[in-house]
Image: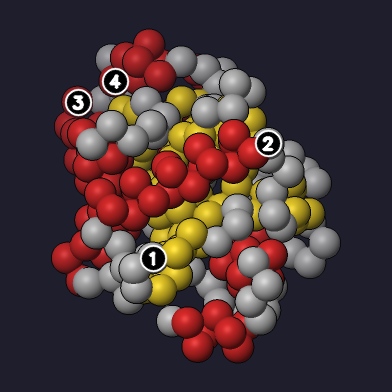
Amino acid sequence: GTGPFEAEIAFDKVLAKDALVGSGVDTPPWVTIEGSALRDLGAGAALPMAVDRVGLPCVVKPSRSGSALGVGFVEREADLAQAIMAALAFSGAAIVERKIEGREVACGLVGAPLEVLPAVEISPKGGVYDYAARYTAGATEYHAPARLSHEEAAAVRRASERAATVLGLRDLTRVDLIVDRDGRPWVLEVNVSPGMTDTSLVPMGARAAGLSLVDLCDRV
């Protein structure tokens, strides 16, 4: 698996996004709100500035968390403060990120060197891939391989490979992306220790490539 230093960088969304954007990987524009700064300075100036920077609607998420815990979707500036406080309950900083409209996909990578598996398209029935949508049976539909054009699938593959290279990921990982309406993939984040149950996203991608869960484990 990914080494400890690289895993630490990848798990921190601020550090990971800094690395990605610095290497030319498309990731949604964002603003970081530190919990300590918010307490010291107040939200009066910071929140309107965040909205000016990323626009609305936006996504608010903890800088260090998983399983969509603490993630909020904000349509109105008046709701931003509450979403930030919810995110700060899980981490010392929150990210306010531009919401990219499009199809959400997850791309597993496995082996040495990393081989990109077919992308899995995620279609939550409630419209939002939150904690409940991830872990409630029947709440989300999955399509493996994702319903992408040949060009879109190739772009997702390139973006996933590039993100994995930039962040030093190895052996088994997953890149989460949004493909916008123009077919452009945006890297949201990576997972250095993705789920490996029979219903997890990486095994779904493996099955689309003709690999059973046993084959996938053997490859790792």
Q: Which of marks 4 and 1 is nearer the N terminus?
A: 4
Q: What residue type is labelled 2?
A: Ser
Kindly identify the residue that appears in the image at 47 percent across and 82 percent down: 219
- Which residue is rendered at x = 22% and y = 42% of the image? 19
Residue type at mark 4 is: Ala
Alpha carbons under labels 4 and 1: distance apart: 41 Å
Circle 1: element type = loop
Give the side of residue 133 with respect to residue 42, left or right: right
Name the residue tied to disc 1: 114
Comes first in the chain, label 4 or label 2: 4
**What residue would you read off at disc 4?**
46
Q: Do the residues labelled 4 and 1 touch (CB within 8 Å)?
A: no
Residue 35 in the image: state x and y as whole percent: 26, 41
Q: In this view, does 65 lie to the left or right of 150?
A: left
Tags 3 and 4 in contact by the CB under 8 Å rule?
A: yes
Q: In this view, does 151 lie to the left or right of 135?
A: left
- Crowd class of label 3 (few under 14; some 14 to 19; many from 20; radius 10 Å): few
- For the residues labelled 1 and 3, the Cα–Cα distance comes to 45 Å
Query: Label 2 belongs to which residue?
Result: 149
- Mark 2: secondary structure: loop
Residue 183: x, y in percent? 59, 28
Q: Is residue 181 visible?
A: yes
Q: Do the residues labelled 3 and 2 touch (CB within 8 Å)?
A: no
Q: In this view, does 85 lie to the left or right of 1?
A: right
- Say which residue appears at 42% left-offset and 42% top-offset: 159
Residue placed under numbered mark 3 in the picture: 41
State which mark lies toward you, 3 or 2. Answer: 2
Q: What residue type is labelled 3?
A: Leu
Instruction: Pick the residue in front: 2 or 137.
Output: 2
